[in-house]
Amino acid sequence: MPRSRSGSRAVLTGSVGAFRRHVSAAALFLCGHQAGEALVPVLVGVIIDEAITTGDPAALAFWLLVLGLDFAMLSFSYRWGARQAWLGDVRADQRLRLMVTARVLDPRGGAEVGRLPGALAAIATSDTKRVGMVNFVLPLGIASAAALVVATVSLLRISVPLGLLVLLGTPLLLVLVRLLGRPLERRSGPEQERAAHASGVAADLVTGVRVLKGIGAEPAAVRRYTGTSRDALTATLRATSAQAWYEGAVLAANGLFLALIALVGGRLATAGEISIGGLVAAVGLAQFLVEPLQIFGWVNGKFAQARASATRIAEVLAAAPAVRDGSRALPAHVPGALAVRDLHHGSLNGVEFDVSPGELVGVVASDPAAAVDLLACLGREVDAKGDVELDGVPLADYPPDTARATVLVAMHDAQLFAGTVAENVRADGRADRDLAPAMAAAQADQVADALPAGIDTPVSEQGRSLSGGQRQRLALARALAADAPVLVLHDPTTAVDPVTEARIASGLREVRRGRTTVVLTTSPALLAVTDRVVVLDDGVVTGAGTHTELLARDDYRALVLA
């Protein structure tokens, strides 16, 4: 808990400190606005005593001019103060979003552990907005304090008892407001957490909607989301109830305090201790004080919400990396020799095998989890016990992004993005890259030919406008077009028909000739074009040889011909 609090405090202070120029300017201008507002009832009281009561036209004209200048000053101050506060708000929000996004996209990973994508999206949007809002509310709080000072001094000049009442009563009221805000702070965290979880569940269900329909799991998915959404609604209602209770209590406390000020002022006027103008000014100041005191309550509520959001942001920013960062530079020439040495991770129990430069090797795993664990190690997603070496150098010695670009792992469920077909296949953005060989090898040229505008056809988010087979072929074409020194493919043909799969197998061998390629699959068509196949069973290598040689083994036949 102390660590969370310190992280939350660092996020809040950093958000304000980075844009202190805007915050300072906003506070200065808004102080001028609030001071001008506080002077309005004072000037009205002066006009009554110095001009209306005496019937002096010159004094009336003069004090009306002063009142007009006060209104001009407070109007100008508010316009520029609010502008600076708003700039501090939106720029702090943007800065925090960039920081969270940079941490999530950090090649070392780790920020996503234990968090659904929807939860991370909520942190990068609503939580950053709540913390950025501090730059808007802080100047308002400072300006309200300035208003209280001006009002207190004015009341002391009108009547010492009234001034002391405000001076001593205001700190007690602020302490009460702070205590009332604690339940709101406690409930803001769970509200955001459950809402983010519901958003993450919804995103996952939408992503897998085709699969859910295919296996008839829609009712279970609906029940899961309904339950999660109900929890989020309950948390939101609890937080909203706390907010309503808090604001009502603050308003009642302010009203009672102001009623006390008006009562004391009326008794002083009756006793003749203050003038009629002084009474009008005192009552006007009492009414004016409603706004700064309400702002104090509002500011405290926003700070309570911001602290809860800052804690969530701090946890993401402080998340431990999933893999260590290497510093070795990649050589100009990468032959692509791959060596797995005594690898232990998940279901892997000392896996060892070698892939020569330019070799096409298949890997058949009896347990799908073992294939996923091996992919995580080859893709530098985890720091496992043992080594994965590239040309004799541990892959962990290279920066994660360098390692992943050199040993490119293409998962079978790779996502497409909103854009054209060409933009999805040419993921690196290089317009001069020839896509034809990769498209042909993946049989993705047939997909493009069937679309209205060919490779310029727009693709919806996550490729939902395409069939599963079309998406898989375009994802494979993207992996082939990257032309990585080492390419690792995971079941790249599970969604295509046998004829297309045979053509892809032939095209894959041709387009990757001279480049190292590893295919984790049980597809006979793909394994038939490999140079060699490695068999994983019970987390260890239990055999290696050509596909034809291994077909003599009963266990191998059971895996690939089932």
Image (cartoon, rainbow, N blue to C red):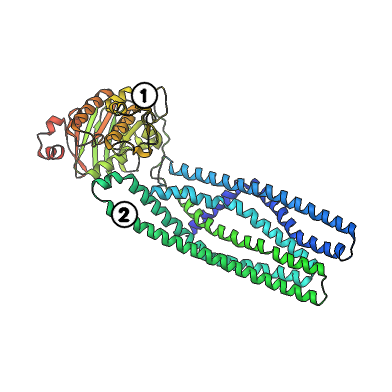
Q: Earlier in the sequence, mark 1 or mark 2?
A: 2
At which x and y percent is residue 281?
77, 65
Which residue is drawn at the image coordinates 53% and 64% (left, top)? 244
The one nearer the camera, 170 or 51, is: 51
Asked which quadrant contains residue 365, the reply is top left
Q: Tag 1: Cα neighbours inside 10 Å, few (<14), some, or many (≥20)?
A: few
Give SS at disc 2: helix
Mark 1 in CB contact with mark 2 (< 8 angstroms):
no
Q: Tag 2: Cα neighbours inside 10 Å, few (<14), some, or many (≥20)?
A: few
Residue 381 placement, left or right of 183 = left
At which x and y percent is residue 43?
80, 60
Residue placed under numbered mark 1 in the picture:
333
Task: Check disc 1 and give the amino acid type.
Answer: His
Give SS at disc 1: loop
Task: Check disc 2 and give the amino acid type.
Answer: Val
Q: Would you place residue 64 above or below residue 535 in this image?
A: below
Residue 78 placement, left or right of 251 = right
In this rendering, the label closer to the viewer, 1 or 2: 2
Q: CA distance from mark 1 to mark 2?
A: 53 Å
Q: Would you place residue 523 above or below residue 33 in this image?
A: above
At which x and y percent is residue 547?
15, 31
Residue placed under numbered mark 2 in the picture:
222
- Residue 187 visible within the image: yes
The one nearer the camera, 65 or 167, is: 65
Residue 471 placement, left or right of 152 = left
Q: Would you place residue 5 above or below residue 372 in this image?
A: below
- Residue 415 visible within the image: no
Mark linked to residue 39: none
Asked which quadrant contains residue 301, the reply is bottom right
At which x and y percent is residue 382?
34, 43
